C-alpha cells in the first residue's frame, strides 16, 4: 500500500500509474482492484467452453427408477419428519434396520454420528426455557442457544430427533453446517494454476515464481536478519502494498484503531506468547514496544489450526500499532453472528474474517450477513474473504447458477407426477464433477425466502456411469424451511442431478465447494462477504510484485482459485421480495451486487511451520487481513472518514488489474 497527499511533490510514479482518473481525495491506496462485471452482466449467463462441448448426457432409466422410489418415500413422511433433514431421516431408518427407500440399494446417509450415537444438529426454533429443558432431557449435549436468531446448536441422540420435531416450537432440524476458512493448500495452488484455461502465460509465470517465493519464505525463517518492527516473519504484502512506505511517509502504524479478527482459533497451539516475544504479535514482551495484548473474546478451545493468529500476524505486519481482538467463528452461524456484533460492541473499528458456512444464502442476507449489516451501519469497516472456490474466467468454476430448466422429463409413478428433471444445457440432465481441491461438497439453494420455502427442490449424486444414486438430499420444503439441500461428500467423476419435486420454477445456485463442474457458470461468491457494505476480498499472489510493489494490469492477476461474482440477490433481509412483480425470480429479478469488491496479497510468510498450510499463507484468508490493515492506516491518518468515504477511496484509487476496466 502507498499513501500520499494529493498533488504532493513527492508523488511517486507507481501511484500515478495506478490512478486512471483525477483523484480528488486525500489519500491514494494501492490495494489491487478486483473488479466485477458491470451490473448489467448476469452471473448465470455464461457457460464454459467445456460446457459447450459437453455431449448430451441423459439420466439412465435405473437412476430414474431409484429417484422415483426416494420421492415415494418422501411423500409418505409425517409432519414431524418433514421438519427433519432427509439424511438424518435416512440415518434413523438405517439405525432401525429399515430400507431408506424400496429401490435405492447403493444410497448411504450423509451423517456423522459420534461414539454415543449422537449427531450435531442445527435447530431453527422459537427458543424457550421449556424447549431447552426438553432437549437436555432427551440427552442433548453442548447446547448453544441464541434466542435472537431462533437458533440452537446441540449434539442430540439420533433416535430422539423425531420425538423432538413434534414440538411446535421447532421449525427445522438439519445436520450442523460446518465452518470453513479460506486458506488454499499448495496442492490446490498447483492444480488450479496448471489447469487454468484462460491465462496460459499467467500460469507459466506463477509456476516460475513459486519456487523463488518458497525460497524467500525459507530464508525469512532460517535467517531472519535484522529484527524489524513487524517480527521475524514479514508478509511480502507489506512491500507489495507499499504499507511500509506509508508508515514512514505519513507517520501512521494503526495506533488508536481497534481491529477484530474472526477465524477458527487463536491460541489452540499454545504458542501465541512466543509470537509476542519475537515481535510478530503485540503484547507484553514485544521487543518493539507494542505491548497492548490481543484481547480474546472467545477462542475455539480445541481443534483449531490458529488460522486467526496467522491473519493477525499479517495485520500486525502492516499496522503494528493497532489494538487486536479475536473471536472464533467456528461454533455455528448464530455464534459467528453474535461474535461479529460483540467485536463491534468492544469498539472494533475494522472487522476481518475468513470463514463461511456452506448454507449461507446467495439470494438473501442470512443471519451472518445481517450481523455484518448491523456493524457496518454502526460505523465499522468489514473485510471478508471472497472465497477460494474458483472462477469462470480461469476455468476453475465449481458453481452452476441459473433458472430451473425443465428437461421435459417428468417422474411419473402411475398417475402421480413426482417432479420434473432439470437440464443444465440442452439435453444434458447430469453435471459431472471434473476435478477439485480438498473441499468438495454440494450446497444447493434456490430463490425462495429463508424460513419460507414452499417450492421443493432435491439434488442427487450418481456414480460415474450415471446408473446408481449414491447420495441424496431431498428434505421437505413445506413453507417454513430454508430453500437448501446439502451433501458433504463429493468425488471426482461423480454426476449431479436436480429435480423440482413440486412448486414453481426458481433461480438455482448449485455449489460444489472447491470442485470443478463440466458445465459451470460465474457467480461463485456468496453469503456475508456479499453484504452490501462489506468488502469481499479476492487474492493476488504477492510474488507477482517481484519483491517490489504491485503495478496492476496483467502483471498482478487474481489467483486462479479466487471466487468470482457477481452476486444477484432476490430478497431483503426480512424476506420481502426486492422485485415482487417478478414472480418467477428469473435472471432479471432482484438486484445485482458488484462483488467481490477488491483484491489483496496472499502467498506470504508467517511464523507457522512449513507443513501447517499457513506458511506460506495462500488464499483469500490471507488477502482479507492485508486489506483490513491498509484501512486501519487510512483511518488513523484521517479518523473522521466515514465508511462510505473509505469505500470510495479504496475502490476508486485501487490498481486496475487483469483486463482494463471492471472484471467480475
Image (spheres, rainbow, N blue to C red):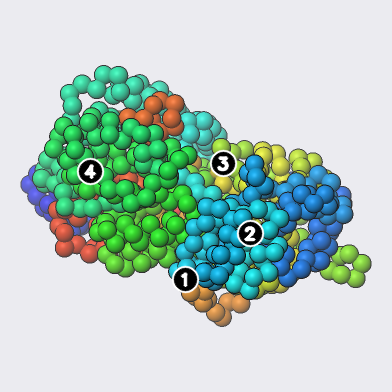
Q: Which type of secondary structure does the marked residue at label 4 adopt?
A: loop
In the foreground, 298 or 222: 298
Q: Is residue 198 visible?
A: yes
Residue 411 quadrant: bottom right
**First reached walking from the N terminus: tag 1 or tag 2:** 2
Within-10-Å neighbours for mark 3: few <14, some 14–19, many 20+: some
Which residue is found at the position 83% from the left and 52% from the top? Answer: 98
Position in image of residue 42 (x %, y %): 52, 61
Marks 1 and 4 in Cβ contact (< 8 Å): no
Residue topped by disc 3: 439
Q: CA distance from mark 2 to mark 3?
A: 33 Å
Q: Nearer the viewer, mark 2 or mark 4?
A: 2
Vertical position of residue 626 compared to residue 636: above or below: above
Residue 138: give its label.
Answer: 2
**First reached walking from the N terminus: tag 1 or tag 4:** 4
Residue topped by disc 4: 293
Q: Is residue 542 visible?
A: no
Which residue is found at the position 50% from the left and 49% from the top? Answer: 179
Position in image of residue 139 (x %, y %): 61, 55
Marks 1 and 2 in Cβ contact (< 8 Å): no
Within-10-Å neighbours for mark 2: few <14, some 14–19, many 20+: some
Residue topped by disc 1: 573
Q: Which residue sits furthest bottom?
A: 581
Amino acid at each position: 500500500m502507498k499513501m500520499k497527499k494529493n498533488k504532493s511533490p513527492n508523488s511517486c510514479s507507481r501511484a500515478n500509474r495506478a490512478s486512471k482518473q483525477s483523484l480528488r481525495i486525500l489519500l491514494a491506496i494501492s490495494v489491487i482492484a478486483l473488479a466485477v462485471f458491470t451490473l448489467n452482466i448476469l452471473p448465470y449467463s455464461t457457460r464454459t467452453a467445456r460446457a459447450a462441448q459437453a455431449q448430451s448426457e441423459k439420466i439412465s432409466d435405473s437412476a430414474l427408477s431409484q429417484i422415483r422410489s426416494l420421492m415415494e418415500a418422501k411423500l409418505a413422511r409425517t409432519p414431524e419428519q418433514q421438519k427433519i433433514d432427509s439424511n438424518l431421516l435416512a440415518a434413523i431408518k438405517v439405525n432401525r434396520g429399515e430400507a431408506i427407500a424400496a429401490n435405492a440399494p447403493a444410497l448411504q446417509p450423509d451423517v456423522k454420528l459420534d461414539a454415543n450415537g449422537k449427531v450435531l444438529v442445527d435447530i431453527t426454533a422459537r427458543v424457550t426455557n421449556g424447549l431447552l429443558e426438553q432437549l437436555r432431557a432427551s440427552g442433548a449435549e453442548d447446547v448453544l442457544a441464541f434466542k435472537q436468531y431462533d437458533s440452537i446448536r446441540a449434539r442430540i441422540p439420533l433416535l430422539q430427533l423425531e420425538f423432538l420435531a413434534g414440538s411446535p416450537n421447532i421449525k427445522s432440524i438439519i445436520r450442523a453446517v460446518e465452518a470453513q476458512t479460506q486458506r488454499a493448500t499448495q496442492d490446490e495452488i498447483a492444480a488450479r494454476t496448471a489447469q487454468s484455461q484462460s491465462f496460459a502465460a499467467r500460469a507459466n509465470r506463477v509456476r516460475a515464481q513459486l519456487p523463488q517465493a518458497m525460497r524467500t519464505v525459507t530464508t525469512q525463517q532460517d535467517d531472519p536478519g535484522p529484527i524489524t518492527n513487524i517480527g521475524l516473519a514479514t508478509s511480502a504484502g507489506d512491500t507489495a502494498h507499499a504499507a511500509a512506505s506509508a508508515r514512514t511517509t505519513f507517520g501512521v502504524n494503526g495506533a488508536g484503531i481497534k481491529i477484530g479478527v474472526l477465524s477458527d482459533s487463536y491460541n489452540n497451539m499454545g504458542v501465541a506468547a512466543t509470537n509476542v516475544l519475537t515481535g510478530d504479535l503485540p503484547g507484553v514482551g514485544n521487543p518493539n514496544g507494542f505491548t497492548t495484548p490481543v484481547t480474546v473474546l472467545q477462542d475455539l478451545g480445541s481443534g483449531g489450526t490458529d488460522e486467526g493468529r496467522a491473519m493477525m500476524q499479517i495485520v500486525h505486519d502492516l499496522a503494528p500499532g493497532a489494538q487486536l481482538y479475536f473471536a472464533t467463528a467456528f461454533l455455528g452461524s448464530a455464534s459467528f453472528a453474535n461474535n461479529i456484533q460483540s467485536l463491534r460492541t468492544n469498539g472494533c473499528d475494522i472487522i476481518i474474517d475468513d470463514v463461511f458456512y456452506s448454507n449461507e444464502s446467495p439470494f438473501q442476507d442470512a443471519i451472518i450477513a445481517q450481523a455484518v449489516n448491523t456493524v457496518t451501519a454502526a460505523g465499522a469497516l468489514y473485510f471478508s474473504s471472497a472465497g477460494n472456490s474458483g472462477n469462470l474466467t480461469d476455468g476453475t468454476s465449481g458453481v452452476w447458477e441459473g433458472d430451473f430448466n425443465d428437461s421435459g422429463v417428468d417422474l411419473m409413478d402411475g398417475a402421480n407426477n413426482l417432479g420434473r428433471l432439470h437440464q443444465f444445457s440442452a439435453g444434458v440432465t447430469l453435471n459431472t464433477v471434473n476435478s477439485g481441491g480438498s473441499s468438495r461438497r454440494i450446497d444447493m439453494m434456490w430463490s425462495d425466502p429463508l424460513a419460507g420455502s414452499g417450492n421443493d427442490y432435491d439434488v442427487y449424486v450418481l456414480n460415474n456411469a450415471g446408473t446408481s444414486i449414491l447420495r441424496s438430499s431431498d428434505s421437505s420444503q413445506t413453507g417454513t424451511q430454508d430453500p437448501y439441500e446439502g451433501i458433504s461428500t463429493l468425488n471426482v467423476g461423480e454426476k449431479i442431478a436436480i429435480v423440482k419435486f413440486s412448486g414453481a420454477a426458481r433461480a438455482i445456485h448449485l455449489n460444489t465447494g472447491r470442485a470443478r463442474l463440466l458445465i459451470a457458470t460465474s457467480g461463485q461468491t456468496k453469503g456475508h462477504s456479499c453484504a452490501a457494505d462489506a468488502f469481499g476480498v479476492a487474492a493476488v499472489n504477492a510474488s507477482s510484485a517481484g519483491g517490489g510493489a504491485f503495478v496492476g494490469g496483467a502483471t498482478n492477476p487474481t489467483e486462479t482459485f479466487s471466487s468470482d461474482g457477481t452476486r444477484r440477490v432476490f430478497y431483503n433481509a426480512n424476506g420481502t421480495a426486492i422485485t415482487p412483480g417478478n414472480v418467477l425470480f428469473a435472471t432479471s429479478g432482484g438486484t445485482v451486487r458488484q462483488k467481490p469488491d477488491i483484491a489483496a496479497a496472499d502467498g506470504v510468510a508467517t511464523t507457522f511451520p512449513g507443513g501447517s498450510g499457513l506458511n506460506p499463507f495462500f488464499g483469500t484468508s490471507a488477502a482479507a487481513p492485508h486489506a483490513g490493515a491498509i484501512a486501519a492506516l487510512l483511518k488513523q491518518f484521517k479518523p473522521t472518514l466515514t465508511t462510505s468515504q473509505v469505500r470510495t477511496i479504496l475502490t476508486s484509487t485501487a490498481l486496475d488489474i487483469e483486463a482494463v476496466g471492471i472484471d467480475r
